[in-house]
Amino acid sequence: MTDTMRLYAFNTGWFQCRPGYFIEGEEGDYLRGPVPSYLIDHPKGRALFDTGMGIRYRRTLADALPPNKFGLQWFEGQEIAARLRSIDVDPASIDWVINSHLHIDHCGGNASLPNATVIVQSRELAAAQATEEAGLYEAVDYATGQPIRAIDGELDLFGDGSVRIVPTYGHTPGHQSAIVTLPDGREVLLAADCCYTERNLDLMVLQRAVVDREAGMRTMEFLHRRRQAGAHILFGHDGRQWQGVEEGKPIG
Ligand SMILES: [Zn+2]
């Protein structure tokens, strides 16, 4: 436990795709984006925002994805449990997991956090459970036995305004983001996949992977307003932005 809240960022693996997957029509070499996870160490408890990928995406350098292939992968030591241990945080000490949504690259580490309660939008849980087709949602990742707190809309996690979960629908039916107010008053908005890259927001262009474009545009407008108001937004899979993120050190 800690006397002041601290926010840490980790990259738990890599997402490779063509630029056109982020912004329709853009061309060029394959891009490599991070698969972020964030630890919020708060005096009232520890929360993780997203948990990375499951064990089946682990690769070694010998069988790594070629750089010109679409896909996901992580290497030993990148998984969230190892990342937490690297800063002397026991994965069993995590009280809350906030899953932005239940796609495979956002809740695959839930299984390694045995004492956490999982917070997810109820409409996201329903969408995952209604999907039979493999590949995007997999029960092996999101149904790992911990208690689930299904919410509808906003939640002030610790009751002090420091961690506000906000609905950011569009990419999936029940996507959510978190607005973390640092002790110095600055806001960090953990966007996750409601907006893959900073460039999407700069151009106000939706990424390709959006199930509800109207809701997605409303979410982009919300992000735009938050940014105008001074929030620092950390995007879902932005390799360029991530170069400026220092992992495993308190942000701010
Ligand atoms: Zn997703």
Image (spheres, grey):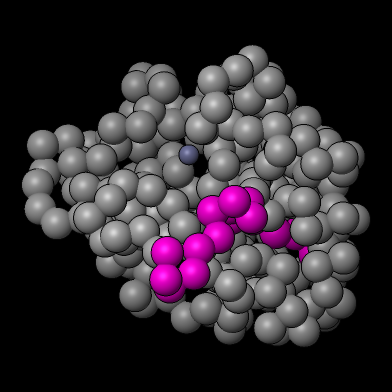
Residue at the spot 68% in from the left edge and 21% down from the top edge? 129
**69 relative to 187, above or below:** above
Please indicate whether residue 220 sits to the left or right of residue 77 in the image.
Answer: left
Where residue 41 sits in the image (x, y, percent)? 75, 70
Residue at the spot 81% in from the left edge and 58% down from the top edge? 113
Residue at the spot 48% in from the left edge and 49% down from the top edge? 191
Front in this rendered view, residue 39 or 181: 39
Residue range in magenta is 46-63
Please say whether residue 61 is one of the residues in the magenta stretch. yes
Please indicate whether residue 130 sits to the left or right of residue 147 in the image.
Answer: left
Please indicate whether residue 74 sits to the left or right of residue 222 in the image.
Answer: right
Where residue 111 sits in the image (x, y, percent)? 77, 51
Where residue 27 sits in the image (x, y, percent)? 9, 47
Residue 217 seen in the current view: yes
Residue 49 seen in the current view: no
Please say whether residue 57 is one of the residues in the magenta stretch. yes
Please indicate whether residue 13 sits to the left or right of residue 240 in the image.
Answer: right
Where residue 204 sits in the image (x, y, percent)? 23, 39
